[in-house]
Every structure is written in C-alpha cells, then in structure tokens.
Amino acid sequence: MKLNKLNYEFDASSEKDVLRHAKALEGHVVGDVYELEKQGKKRAEILDRYQEKRITGGILQNGETVKYAKGSIGNLVQEIYFGIPANSDRRCDIKECGVELKVSKLVELKSNELRVKERLVLGMINSKESLPQNFEDSHVYEKCRLILLVYYINRALDGLKPFQFPFYKSVYMTIPRCDLPQIKRDYEYIRDCVNGKRYNQLHERRAKYLSPAPKNGKRAFSFKISYMNQIFSEYIKSGILMYKPGDKSFAFQARQKYESIVKDERELARKSLEEIVCEKFQKYKGQTIFEIRKQLMKKAEYQNWLSSRSSKPNKAELAKTTFMMLGIKGNKAEEFEKAGIYVKTLKVNKDGSMNEDISFPAFEFDELVSQSWMKSSVYLDIVEREFFWAVFQESDDGFRFRGVKFWTVPEGDVDEIKKGWSDIRSIVKKNKVRFFVKNRDKGKPIVWNSFPDSQNIHKGSEKYRECRASCDMNRIIAIRPHTSQVYYDLKNPRYSDTRYSRFNGSKLPNGDVMTKQCFWLQNEYVLEAVQDLLVLSDDENVIE
C-alpha cells in the first residue's frame, strides 16, 4: 500500500482532524518525520536538535559527544509534526480542542507480543503548591480527560536505529468509568501527602493506577506501566475505540481482560480495594483447603477434585483456591493486573518455615550495570511495588488458610535492598565474578560462581574454599539462576555448556556468558512480613 506523504497541516480546533493527522503516521517510521522537516520548513535548530545521533548518543560531525536522550522521539514528533514545542505546561498540549498528546514506546517480546514499557507521565507534582480537593478540578484531570496516544515500536533489539522505528497506532484514550473511583482514590492519596507537607512520603507503591512516579529527583503524576499495558491490551491492540470524535451518540463500553474483584465500581467510593478484598477472605480464615473448596465448588466438581488430587496440595492448587475465595474463576484479577500487584500464595510448614523464595524476572548483566538505582528492575519490581500475600500453613489435618495481607517494603529496609543490588552490580561491573567447575562421577559438571549464597559464605564449606563469595550475603535479596536450562561459555576456567538455547545465557562485561540470573526475596524475610498470620501451636482455636 502506497503511503501518503506526511505534511504539517491539521486543524488544531478539531478533535477529529487532530486524530486524522496522527493516524497519517501509521505505516511510516520515525525518520519520515525528520525527513518532513528536512524537505519542508528546514529549521536549522530543529534539524540539529533531533538528528539521529542526538537520540542514540554518540559523536556528532562537529566532534561533540552527546549522550542518549530519553524522550527525544516523543519531542521530535510533538515539535515537528504537531508544531508543539517541548514544554512543562500544566495545560493540555493541544489547547484548542483539549487534547493531551503522548508519544509512547512499545517493545516486542520474544513471543511477538507488544508491550508498553514506560509510564504515561501526566505532569510534575509541585511540593510547594496545594492540590485542589476534587480530582476533576486538578490539572492532571485536564491532562488525562482526553489523551491522544501515538505509539511507535522500539526495534533496537532487531538491530534497527531510532529513525527506522515504525509507528504502530494513533488512538484516543479516556478513563474507563470502572477505573475512575480508584484513580480518584490515588489522587486523594497524592493530594493529602502534598497538602499535608509530606511530599517525601509519596511512593508509587502506595497508589494503584495513578501514581507519584519518580522523575528527575521529584515526583510526577503518571499512569503505571501495568495500568497502561491493560489499557493497551483491552482496547488499543484489540481495535476497541475509547472515544469517537464528532459522534455524540458514541457510547464507550468498558472492557476487562480478566474477571473483576469489585463487581460494582460504586463500592470503591465507600471502601478501599484493600478493605473489599480482605473482607472477602475473612470468613475462610482457619479453614482447611477441603472446607473452603467444599463451600465454593459444586458437589460433583468437588468430588472430582477430591478423587484426582495428590496427597498434598501443590502451589497451583493453593493459588487457585485463593482466587476462588475472591470469587474469581481464573488465576488473575483485573484490579491486581492493572495495579501491578504481585500476588503470591505462600505455602508455610507447620513449624513456621518456608521452603521457597520469591523470584522476579531474569535480567541481562549489561542492563544491571547501566541502570541507575531508581530505574533498576529491583527498585521497580520490589521497592516500588505492592505485594499481596495469601498464606496457607500445614497442620495435622491438611493445609489451613491463615489469611491475606497487602504489603509493601518498609521504608527502613530500602537501604538494605539497595546495598544488595549495588553489591551484585559492583561484582559484575568490576569483573569480580569467579567460576569453579566441579566434576562429578556421573552427569555434567556443576559450575559454581562467586555470587553470594548460603554455602560460599561459610568458611568450612568446599564451595567457600573453591569459589568464595565476592561480597557478603544480603539478608533481603539474592541472585540465583532463572532457569534449569544452563548455558555457559567461559574463558577462565575454560568451559562450555551450550546444550540449550543462547537465550538462557547472559554476557558479562569480560565476554563470559553464564546462565541468566534473577533477583529473589529471601524466604526468611517474606516470613517476617506474614508472621502475624501464622499459628505456631497445635491448638487451632488460637486463630479465632
């Protein structure tokens, strides 16, 4: 299909024509917008500001060295194509028709699925200025009342440069009615902190959808990545319109990818999500998995489950029971997904111990080294995230449900987590990762590394003698392999095990490749968080 040539012209007073202008980008690449300026207005300062080297970072023709400029693609599209200079104006970008413009990045996963990778920032939060009582009177409401989303796909992993990144879709976004009560609650949390002179108590983990995200050492109103991914998945990728300019009869129908915990959004005007959720679990506390399922399953379904199950419930069975108590048939809930809440069912032994740690996504070593603390996966996935623990504990007559808890990292533990992250990062950055290949009589050798673990920190162990830890063990976080499919290509000692896909390995700064790692929360630390829910007595009556 022959693409129309891009031009500057559009009617800024017309929502419909603004959308037409944005949709003309679909099928084009970022470089076409720059080419429009080269062939059109030819403004020297604009052409210099947005030349590709200034976006990627590197050495310009005049010998100047520039760093990667985050957000420059968005500014390029905004300033050249829409004629709006980059600004920090509290009012919406296209004031003539009340539209906020957002150029947003997508990435393509290994599964070919497109995902949003950035928060949608809506404006800075001023610590010295009071926020209006009502959300509808705030500048952030003006910004998010009607948003024009212009999506492009970052294909850097495919070897493409920024000017080759394709535009994907341009669409209008409005706030779904079912989300508005929670967004108002999030705004009220931010408003109360700011107006109460508690700006330093603003944290992303305390909000659900609309969060006070860190930005340039301050805080900014933003929709969470998790929230924008749900919006993208439920509406934009599916081709479902959220707003149709010029059509007064258009009725926006809210969609949900997963079942909702809150069946009537008006309930959120009276109670918080935490209160609603915890109330649903209250009547099941102290009951065995059998007693719970007998209440929640049809008789034939329950009998079939009894006859097919193993002697002890597995993790999946307990997790399923957790969602059944919430009234959810599947294993995901709409509100949890939108808020990015980490949901975990904990299986605790009779003595109060737990065998498993809590893992997070695998990381690449080059990302670990290049990221700052507040942009690191540890900060985003652990420190600034809310967790939801559902606890089952072993008893004489099976596993009993002990309760649930919404939890975030205590402020006093943040520095300890940061130290654990920094120690691992330093080991990698300074090439202090050591390896020892232990041969076995049968099977493949075992490869030990010097990232701290429970064995290589103890002087009496063989692992300590052969591959001593490069730093102290952190009491909260650690790193371990993310997969059982190992991948090694080492120079010292010389060793290779490439039976499985290269995808399972990650390259260290010195060129060695080792099995991908991920960060974990230590199980003892997680148990501390739910200690008040556990029963360390044979007398089950103490739970009442």
Image (cartoon, grey):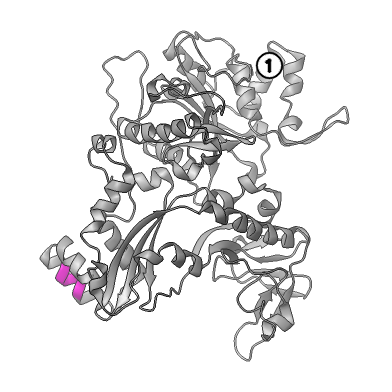
Magenta stretch?
A: 302-306
Residue carrying label 1:
37
Q: Nearer the viewer, residue 502 or 350?
A: 350
- Residue beneath the point at 23% across and 75% down: 308
- Point out the residue furthest to the bottom here: 441
Residue 320 falls left or right of residue 408: left
From the viewer's perspective, is residue 480 above or below residue 228? Answer: below
**Magenta span contains residue 304:** yes
**Magenta span contains residue 251:** no
Q: Is residue 166 visible?
A: yes
Examine the residues drawn in magenta and state their main secondary structure: helix
Q: Position of residue 104 (x, y in %)?
A: 54, 32
Q: Nearer the viewer, residue 60 or 390?
A: 390
Task: Give amino acid for label 1.
Answer: Glu
Q: Is residue 258 visible?
A: no
- Residue beneath the point at 36% across and 23% down: 243
Can you tell which quarter of the image residue 255 is in? top left
Q: Position of residue 512 (x, y in %)?
A: 74, 65
- Residue beneath the point at 44% across and 47% down: 340
Residue 12 falls left or right of residue 488: left
For the C terminus, give its image quadrant.
bottom left
- Point out the residue furthest to the left here: 299
Can you tell which quarter of the image residue 478 is in? bottom right
Q: Position of residue 519 (x, y in %)?
A: 57, 61
- Point out the residue furthest to the front here: 196
From the viewer's perspective, is residue 287 above or below residue 417? Answer: below
Residue 131 falls left or right of residue 297: right
From the viewer's perspective, is residue 227 above or below residue 488? Answer: above
Are there few (<14), some (14-19), or many (20+) residues within 10 Å of tag 1?
Answer: some
Q: Position of residue 98 (x, y in %)?
A: 45, 14
From the viewer's perspective, is residue 404 above or below residue 522? Answer: above
